[in-house]
Each structure stands twice: as structure tokens, then as C-alpha cells.
Amino acid sequence: MERTLNLFDRFDKLDTKINKWLVANSINILRFSMGIIFLGFGVLKFFSGISPIEVLATRTTSVLTLGFFTGHKAMLFVATLETIIGLCFLTGMFLRVGVWLLAVQMIGAMSPLFLYPAELFSGPMHAPTLAAQYIIKDIILIAAGMVIASTWTGARIIAKPQSLRSTLTRRVPGIYQDVTTVPYA
């Protein structure tokens, strides 16, 4: 029994070290990962016929820009937007601008779900098509963008290590804010 307890305590120390590392590095890793994704997918869209979402993105951009961008120009617009977002996230420069551009891009990326629902949910029992699944997964990019945006004004994750055993039966904690330090509360 003592050996099992010792092993559990050792794992608990490892778990705490990993948590401290995650607190120190996860936001930057998230930002960098999103930068790679947006830069990669943005660059693909510069080349006609490579992006699997090209036809849908072109139609959607044409509708959302009221015909200002059509055809290949629509795809170049989306490609440029995504590339700029990717560069902002990768470098950390103009990050606030990059997150705002991400918000605009995500509105455009999610809008086919509302513009073309019959086309995107045409499977048996209205199951989403592959294109719809491609769009729906962007929800995670929106959430990741929100996490990155939360650091604009210097907000940071703070490690408050607790033993693994003490957290096993509790729910995941929410975000707590000390209202005494917030000037607008």
C-alpha cells in the first residue's frame, strides 16, 4: 500500500510540474498553432483548385460582399485575409488586429451554414456533409481566438497547484475574478 501511495505522490508531483509548464506555455502554443493553420490554409487558397472548400467559399464571399468580390477575386480576398491572420498569430505582432480579422473571417466561414443549409445538411436525416463538418469544426477556432483575445490587456493564466487527489471529485473550476482590482466593476 505504501508503494502505491508513493507512486501516486510521484505522479502528483509530475502532474503539478506539467500543469505549471502548461500555464507558462499553452497560450503561446495555441497562438502559434492557429497561426500555422491560418497561414497554411490561407496560402492554399491562392492556388486555384487546391482548397476543398474553394467553390463554397467563393460563393459565400460573393454573397457576403454583395458581389464586390466574385470568382477568383473572392478566393484571393479570403486567402489574403487568412494569410494576414496567420502572420499576426505567428509573429504576435498586430495580434489585436489579427483577432479582429479572425472574428470577421469566422463570420464569413460560418455563414454557409445559414446561407446554404439544404446543401450542407443533405445527408440521411439531414446529416452534415463533409463541407458542413469542415465549417462546424471552426467553432473550436472561435473559442481559441477568444482565449487569445483574453490576453490583450495582459491577462494571464495563474498556476495555483493543487494535489491531484484533492481535485478528483470536484468539477472543473470556473474563472474567478477579483472585482476589487477591476476598475470598471
Image: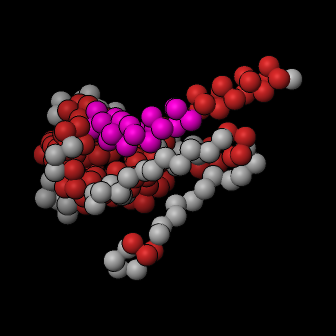
The residue lying furthest to the right in this view is: 1
Please tell me which residue lies in front, 72 or 9.
9
Position of the C terminus by quadrant: bottom left
Please tell me which residue lies in front, 111 or 156.
156
Query: Residue 178, percent across and down?
Result: 47, 69
Position of the N terminus by quadrant: top right
Query: Residue 48, percent across and down?
Result: 19, 31
Please tell me which residue lies in front, 109 or 127.
109
Image quadrant where residue 107 sits: bottom left
Image quadrant where residue 183 sits: bottom left
Asked if the stretch drawn in magenta spans residue 18, the answer is yes
Asked whether the viewer can see residue 34, the reply is: no
The residue lying furthest to the bottom in this view is: 185
Residue at the (67%, 39%) spot, across then down: 164
Taking the image as shown, residue 13 lies to the left or right of residue 2, namely left
Residue at the (38%, 73%) spot, across then down: 182
Asked whether the viewer can see residue 95, the reply is: yes
Taking the image as shown, residue 127 lies to the left or right of residue 8, namely left
Please tell me which residue lies in front, 116 or 158.
158
Query: Residue 171, percent across and down?
Result: 68, 53
Q: How is the image coloured?
A: secondary structure
Give, as a single range, the part of the protein colored magenta.
Answer: 16-36
Dominant secondary structure of the magenta stretch?
helix
Number of dots carrying numbers: 0
Query: Residue 160, percent across and down?
Result: 53, 49
Residue at the (30%, 57%) spot, across then down: 154
